Amino acid sequence: MPNDAVVIGNKQAFMELAAYASDIEKGAKRRPIMLVGPPGTGKSLSANAIAEQHNWNVVELNASDYRDKDTIEKRLVSASQTRSLFGKKNLILLDEIDELAGRFDKGAGSAISNLIKVSKNPIVFTANDRWAQSISFLRQAVDYIEFKKLMPFEVAEILEKYIAAHGIKVSKQMIDMVSNRCNGDARCAINDIDVLDGATEEATEIIGLRDKKVDVFQTLDKIFFSNTYSAPLMAATNSDVDNNMLIKWIDENIPKRYTERQDLADAYAMLASASSFFNNATRSQYYTYWRYMNVMMTSGVALAKNSYPDRTRRYTFPKTISELSRTKESRGTGYVIAEKLRKRIHTNEKRILKHEMKLLGDMIRDSQKTKESEESTYDFFTARFGLETKEIDWIAENAT
């Protein structure tokens, strides 16, 4: 039987796929199967689980691969007609088939149609949208199995099994929060839980609602695993992560995916160019520079690699975000103090935090050299600005 987490929420769909595989094993002639449903519902995982059950070898082509006619013929056609070196059947898996980009996959449709005709091995497609125009040529050539969107309690059950299997330390509140925010996408929920491993409750504020067109983890996957110009650029365009923050995400995670020294150097060179264009656009208000920035930080980083990326390591949040989360309370205290000072210094809070607060910090620290001087300084700040002792201490510790 499959791992329980595979079929949570979609047991019926999995059983239909199991029946298909059983027919193939008995020598029945079956059309290819297309697994359709929202992202993160277990389509690809189910296909791999079925292959494992029947000891089939998986030959996969996903949306990050370059899927032109030559690639499909070289990687899939021969595999579809033979068995592996150890006599296993090959399961031909074309993941996210509706992600075909006609401009860059010229001839892919005819190559896939030919693949179906000549294949002696089972073929499984996955798609988010069965009605996508890009795969209309497949509608009469495949049978469909529907995967439904997962409910929050089903995602929570999947997370609990994943957490137990991997020794991840998160609270029940975090599990509930991620389950409710992931919009039925278990894959994104697992990504979030991976990143929250051992984190405090404050860190949950940086996990956004999963109602975005493309979440940040999917965007990063497209950038690091793509071998085409279009896929990473399109993912960034469809993402709601702002440009500056996406640069930080990529910067933080390049070493998680690229392991070769030259790949790292070339990827960071592209990202440095992107950052330069971003800064130029911001300073000059000439936002045409963003076109170049987008290409450099997505397609440039994607095509900088010559070796296959590491899939095993988890994505981590940019240190900038982690630092903001860690210092949230402290920064809040600073604004409270600045509001009090504004009434006496007669300038805005931003200037107080940036300039005047440092001067006050120097005064307080100088006064702490002797007890008498410190006491008189504390009395002055309390009487003149209405500050409490803990607020004066905060200025001394943080305003440097």
Image (cartoon, rainbow, N blue to C red):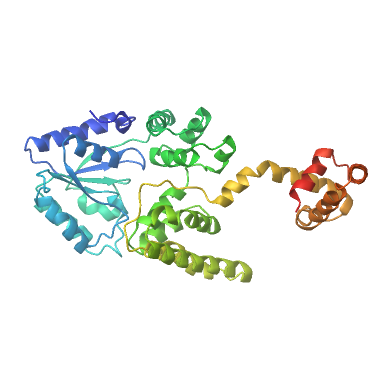
- Viewer-closest of 43 and 86: 86
* Residue 295 horizontal side relative to residue 43, left or right: right
Image position, residue 86 (x, y; %) = 11, 45
Image position, residue 326 (x, y; %) = 62, 43
- Viewer-closest of 84 and 393: 393
Image position, residue 68 (x, y; %) = 24, 62
- Whether residue 213 is visible: no
Quarter holding residue 41? top left
* Residue 138 horizontal side relative to residue 349, left or right: left
Quarter holding residue 151? top left
Q: Quadrant of the N terminus?
A: top left
The residue at the far left in this view is 27
Residue 247 versus residue 174 in the image, above or below = below
Residue 55 versus residue 115 in the image, above or below = above
Quarter holding residue 296? bottom left
Q: Quadrant of the C terminus?
A: bottom right
Query: Residue sitting at 43 percent across and 55 percent down?
Result: 255
Query: Residue sitting at 85 percent across and 42 percent down?
Result: 387
Image position, residue 358 (x, y; %) = 79, 55
Query: Residue sitting at 36 percent across and 46 percent down?
Result: 312
- Viewer-closest of 14 and 321: 321
- Whether residue 308 is visible: yes
Q: How many marks?
A: 0
